[in-house]
Image: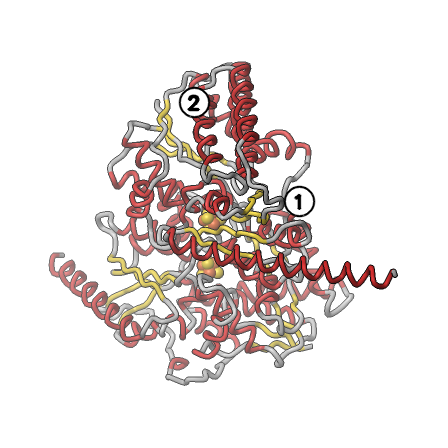
Amino acid sequence: MRIGMPHMGNLHITLKTLFERLGVDYVIPPSNSQRTLSLGAKYSPEGLCIPFKLTLGNLIECAAMGADTLLMPGGNGICRLGYYAKVQQQVLREIGYNAEIVELGVSERKLIGFMQMIKRLSNDASWYRLITSFRFALAKLHALDAIERSVQKVRPAEQVKGAAQELYTSAIEAIDGANDYASLKKIKKSYLAQLDAVPRQSRANPLKVRVIGEFYVVLEPFSNLDVEVELGKLGVEVRRTTFISEWTKFSLFLNPLGINEKERYQRAAMPYLKHDVGGEGWESVGEKVLHAGEDYDGIIHLAPFTCMPEIVAQNIMPTTQEDIPVLTILCDEQMGKAGMLTRLEAFVDLLERRRRARLACNNVRRAYGSLLRD
Amino acid sequence: MKIGIPRALLYYQYYPMWKHFFEELGAEVVVSPHTTRVILSSGISRVVADTCLPAKAYMGHVMSLVGKCDCVFIPAIRSLKAKVFNCSKFLGLPDMTRAVVPECPPILSIDVDMNKGEKELWREIDRLGRHFTRNHSKVRQAAMSAWQKHLEYCRLMVEEGLTPPQALERMFGLEAEPEGKGASKEKALPTADASGQAHIAVIGHPYILYDHHVSHRLINWLQQHNIRVHTPEMLAAEAIDSGIGRLVGQSYWTYEYEVVGAGGHYLEHDVDGVIGLVAFGCGPDSLMMDMVRRHSALPGAAAFMNLTLEEHTAEAGIVTRLEAFVDMVRRKKRRKETCA
Ligand code: SF4
Ligand code: SF4
């Protein structure tokens, strides 16, 4: 048996570790590229969202590399995602592959279900071996995400554009190669220090935007045309909530205890949207409401083209009382980089102007205040 | 109290039930007019472009009710069967409407989620009824008799082969149509099979099939061209279930029955051809209709055509495709008959 799984961000590094430690035969498809997208789009029905197309491209490539068991997230009540596997299986059959798609019920049993599945696939490895391998894989995931967070901070301020990104790429490689906790820790520490040492511009307070939206397009840089890197080049600092390590932390340890990471956003969305609408639609509305009151200059809202939950969110978001500029980017194979860059630049301009206006306003208020006091 | 019901989306499936419920509780019910170009384009002007066509039409209908009623009934129907869900737009319908039609009269809503069990449903019904009366048992009675009305409506369609508009006409008499293109004079479908008559099934969401403006009266056109039309509502539950079982195993969406279930059944039984009607921008359909299309490639399946309806779809274009399809179906049928 040979396992294959679609890409999402750096997830494959974690899975690779897990599979290797458990002695499971696996393939990692080539990273997402135009080729993957065209391949997926070619066999996709009309009107589907980009996660479907890219994952289909990955699965076809896995099958071509000899994988016979393909893992796909699935499950009930999570929008079209739960239906992907049924159609993708048909597509694979039609192209002539015999690979079997196994659905991971991420919505109901979350990681526990995933572990049980891995146990089965690894020829019933002992729980001890499973859990130790899993822990190490998770440690890599956390290291990757910690470094990414630091990269997000350095990008907008670096003197030489691209320095942080370069470090990030080599950090990913190093972490991929780490074989034990000690070297992993050393790698993490060394890269965090190097990132810290990247020469920065003196401008103290870069614009700050929050990236929100549908899980997959937020986490898979290829699908959003590297929007975070581009924002960094424009000198904008990016923050986001969605990290894979966050998701595993909650679904593995905290959700069973009844702690829900999304509740904060859901509560904030309540006055405008009372229901979960699948995907991240509810949270998108909530994040807009919350971050409008925080120290952000704007919001980048990433949504796959034709994504149903995000369409509901898009219809509701402009009407909330809490106001903050939002730029919605629809991710699709039609989206061109040049077009996106123009829109990003215009948006950043707008944010700059707003901030200047706000500062001027504050200065006047301060001057006025001291006048009154005198 | 006057309650407005938009003639869109779930209207086609539940109107008799809703009407009866509200009237039992002493309210008056008004329905928005049939979809027109004006209604559709006013809806389109309010929502983001990639919203699906039926949701756009829905907003237009709500707008046309402004000033004509005291409140509008917009249910949030999440799930009608455990683990089978509706699409995002149904889940967020009241909230989305409030956001894009701010001038909308107060919204009466009910959350239907069968995952939470029957008890919760009753609690929701009580909550809805409290707007009219404090008398619990009166609300329950109204709900029970409304349910009977719904069953009667379904029976008309399954046993007598009526389409929803015909069944509504039978139950409530004629509702005047603004354009009066003679559509309301549809006769009940002849049950006897005039020999040689081709049978075609039209599958898709009821709010696409029976909205004359959105579907360009496709069903009427077929009937006028001497085609015996079959629709998903005419199938009994067992036929639908076995259709779903064959194509996808288990249903995932509520709409599975009108698309996959009906598709699975008709591709193999009763008819010579199947037309799948899809609205532009429909998320579930992009996957479900694709399953039906793939199944139609199997040997022995009826001919299949997929028609996507957009706001700019011209009637002429549809007619051309229909003519070609009907010709093909008739030719195939003749060939089969001569072979036999
Ligand atoms: S949430 Fe959006 S992108 Fe994800 S499956 Fe649903 S429609 Fe597609
Ligand atoms: S099922 Fe399709 S057509 Fe109906 S509301 Fe949802 S997306 Fe729109």
Residue B72 can be seen in this image: yes
Left or right, B91 with respect to B248, comes to right
Q: CA distance from mark 2 to mark 1?
A: 34 Å
Q: Secondary structure at mark 2?
A: helix
Q: Quadrant of residue A102?
A: top left
In the picture, the disc for residue A263 is: 1
Left or right, A191 with respect to B37, comes to right
On-image quarter of the C terminus of chain A: bottom right
Q: Give neighbour class at mark 2: few <14, some 14-19, many 20+ (Cα, 10 Å).
A: some
Badge 2 and badge 1 in a common chain: yes
In the picture, the disc for residue A303 is: none
Q: Give neighbour class at mark 1: few <14, some 14-19, many 20+ (Cα, 10 Å).
A: few
Q: Nearer the viewer, residue B124 or A285?
A: A285
The earlier-in-sequence mark between 2 and 1 is: 2
* Disc 1 residue type (three-letter): Glu
- Find residue B31 and report its horizontal and vertical position in percent: 56, 76
In the image, the residue with mark 1 has its CB under 8 Å from the nearest atom of ligand 1: no
Left or right, A78 with respect to A94, comes to right
Identify the residue at image location x=37%, y=70%. Answer: B215
* Disc 2 residue type (three-letter): Leu
- Find residue A91 and report its horizontal and vertical position in percent: 30, 42
- Find residue A203 and report its horizontal and vertical position in percent: 59, 45
Q: Nearer the viewer, residue A109 or A41?
A: A41
- Find residue A123 and report its horizontal and vertical position in percent: 43, 17
Residue B114 can be seen in this image: no
In the picture, the disc for residue A121 is: 2
